[in-house]
Image (spheres, helix red, strand yellow):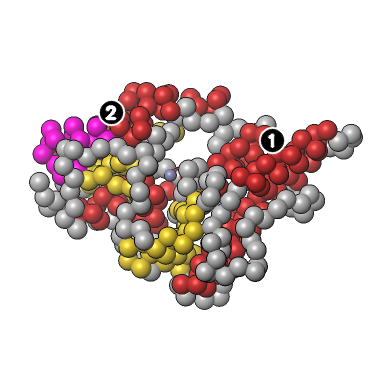
Amino acid sequence: MSFRGGPVLGIESSCDETSAAVVLQGRVTGHVILSQDAHAVFGGVVPEIAARQHLAHIDGVVAQTLDEAGVRPADLAGIGVTAGPGLVGALLVGLNWAKGFGYALGLPVVGVHHMEAHLFANSLESPEATPPFVALLISGGHTLLLHASEWGTYELLGSTRDDAVGEAFDKVARRLGLGFPGGPEIEKLARQGSAGTYRLPRPMLSTREGPGDAGYFDFSFSGLKTAASLLIAEVEQAEGGDLDTARAHVAAEFQAAVVEVLVTKTMRAVEHTGCPRVLLGGGVARNGPLRERLAAALEPTGSMFAPSPRLSTDNAAMVARLAEYRLLAGQVDGLDLNADPALSFPGLS
Ligand code: KG4
Ligand code: ZN
């Protein structure tokens, strides 16, 4: 079954967003994202609930997407679906749905890597966001710093040695009594506080290291998370003072520490590769102070690409966009395509 060109349907169900989109020649014509709010009371995503919610909503999400795009199933030319990484039960719902739909309609189906799709999110809004670039992919499950010489050819420069950066935001937010997901909540609270009132560490920023050293491009957020947690316990136990303001100061300092680490490591990658074009992807790329600081660090010669908030977090438009690219390159998967919760990044060296 080969791709003859035409609208591509993308399906995303790797975590807690049930999403479908139609992309035609790099442009989104229909897009629905259903964020499951059933997890909020648990303070994190419950895999079993996520899978059940995907199953309950995927038909309706796709129907609404096709309606918005003004296409009938018979008008579609191909299907792309997230095959991994992610929660296996959640992935399986989207994947089997896509395979069944593709089989019934005689359409080519291609499985895509969720984090590579985050890279492609940028090109939906900025067609010039193409390789070469340095990419900082920052989400709830991943922290990756890579260099792309062309689509599909990526050099891994650094990654996290423990927690992903979004995970650290979520855990510190929880400790501060904030809602889930924690990133936006910390960003909001931080506006009422001042970084520097308290001091938290900036992990793995040794100035004695160079590109040949193991930790030069890598990240570690677990120690920072623990330090923030201890600081919160300290301010909560302190006599007197305004606890709400103290918490806002902690949020501001935590965010400042994360931003400083992310910006410094990214600028190291820019210097090392000689490539001043930086692309952001993943939910943490929504963070305002991070965008501002990184854009400022790249001036005056560099450029930064970051998707709009809706396309930064999980969505199917990025999946459809990557699928369209791969289908045009003649890549199609068979019915043996399977979900892989630990799928490795394609083309990575
Ligand atoms: O890419 P994404 O939607 O899902 C994954 O693939 O993991 O990323 C979700 C993560 C969560 O950890 C959330 O707290 C974080 O992105 N996030 C943010 C912000 N908005 C979402 N982190 C910092 N600042 C934000 N404004
Ligand atoms: Zn994601």
- Which label belongs to residue 117? none
Q: Residue at x 12, y 52 (%)?
A: 4
| Secondary structure of residue under mark 1 | loop
Residue density around tag 1, few if under 14, some if 14–19, many if 20 or more, within 10 Å: many
Q: Residue at x 34, y 42 (%)?
A: 84
124 is higher (above) or lower (below) than 139: below
The answer to whether 336 appears left or right of 244 in the picture is left
On the image, the x and y values in percent for residue 52 come to 37, 23
N-terminal of the pair, mark 1 or mark 2, is 2
| Secondary structure of residue under mark 2 | helix
The answer to whether 310 appears left or right of 201 in the picture is left
Quadrant in which ligand 2 is drawn: top left
Q: Residue at x 65, y 43 (%)?
A: 225
Say which of 119 and 57 sits in front: 119
Front: mark 1 or 2: 1
Task: Magenta stretch: give its range.
Answer: 94-109
Can residue 175 be seen here? The reply is yes
- Residue corresponding to mark 1: 176
Can residue 310 be seen here? The reply is no
- Residue corresponding to mark 2: 59
Total residue callouts: 2
On the image, the x and y values in percent for residue 87 come to 39, 34
Q: Residue at x 16, y 42 (%)?
A: 334
The answer to whether 165 appears left or right of 6 in the picture is right
Name the kind of residue labelled 1 in the image: Leu
Residue density around tag 2, few if under 14, some if 14–19, many if 20 or more, within 10 Å: few
On the image, the x and y values in percent for residue 244 come to 77, 37
